[in-house]
Image (cartoon, helix red, strand yellow):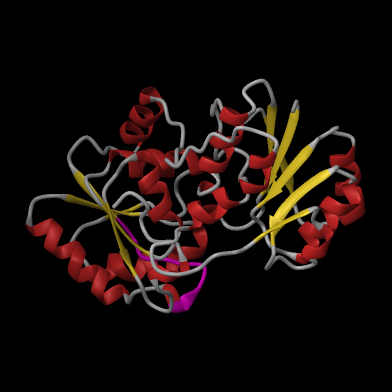
Amino acid sequence: MKKVLVFQTAFLGDLILVSPLLKSLKRTFPGAEVSLVVRKGFEEVFRGAPFVSQVIPFDKKGVLKFSRLLASGDFELVVSPHRSHRTSLILWLSGIKRRIGFDKAGFSFLYTDRVKYRMGRGIHEIDRNLDLLKPLEVDYSVVYEKEPELPLTPAEVERALKKFSLEKSYVVLAPGSVWRTKAWLPEYYAEVSNYFKGKGLTVVLVGSPKDYLYCKRVEELSEKVLNLCGKTSLREFFSIVKGALLVISNDSSPVHVAISVGTPVVEIYGATVPEFGFFPYRN
């Protein structure tokens, strides 16, 4: 196997959780190029990762054009945790000979190998993603890597902390969410913030520009906090999480960033439950 592709164009948290799948493919096929399709804007997530040879951005437009692009890549295998109809169609049109996806994916009949999508207590998204390698066990000695990873250099982390004057110990709060029903009330986050301020710790708010209203409200209700919502690059956000004593977040991407850089994390559930498979993997 010389050229392998992984396709995951979902949200940031979903993308981060494919790192064990990427690492497993690289361990299984050490001489292969392992390429990754991501949602446009997420090209820097795995920058410097030894288990990714190439990152291909997709803006979710132009199905035929993108399938032709993949066809030109001479991939022998594609593994797709993404379950959309569009993804299944693109991969079928690409002509990649072996295509592994979930049985719950839209147009799943277009995959050459369909894997049961498991749910239930104790089953994490990482476990589900690694299930996609089971069909390969017939012909190959599959090596499984389960630890999520975001590659960050010490110098990169140091630059980010220096840029935002985070020389003292701090905790990170992530009050936003793409889904409003997942977001804990800003009033509660403010209480948590004030608790840590009372312990002499700096409190840092993080989030994308779309989380601005959540973070602004927490800032208004709290004692002095450092509100970095929408002010960091992706890699700076990862570095700030890496340097924190603790992260507290809704069921959203900061949870998976934290587990991937080794920072303790507390996850708050609203409309979701751990049985969906997105609980802190190492906590």
225 drawn magenta:
no
- Image coords of residue 99 (percent x, y): 78, 48
Image quarter of residue 77: top right
Whether residue 40 is visible, yes or no, is no
Is 201 displayed left or right of 259 in the figure?
left
Is 154 displayed left or right of 264 in the figure?
right
Please determine whether, in this image, residue 235 is positioned above or below residue 227: above
Count of residue discs:
0
Is 61 displayed left or right of 227 in the figure?
right
Image quarter of residue 124: bottom left
> What residue is rendered at 92% in x and 53% in y?
64
- Image coords of residue 68 (percent x, y): 91, 44
180 drawn magenta:
yes
- Image coords of residue 201 (percent x, y): 14, 49
Please determine whether, in this image, residue 103 is positioned above or below residue 44: below
> What residue is rendered at 33% in x and 49% in y?
282
Please determine whether, in this image, residue 222 is positioned above or below residue 283: below
Whether residue 198 is visible, yes or no, is yes
> What residue is rendered at 38% in x and 38% in y?
239
Q: Which residues are magenta?
A: 173-181
Work out whether residue 234 or residue 110 is closer to the camera in this orientation and state it: 110
Work out whether residue 142 or residue 108 is closer to the camera in this orientation and state it: 142
> What residue is rendered at 64% in x and 27% in y?
29
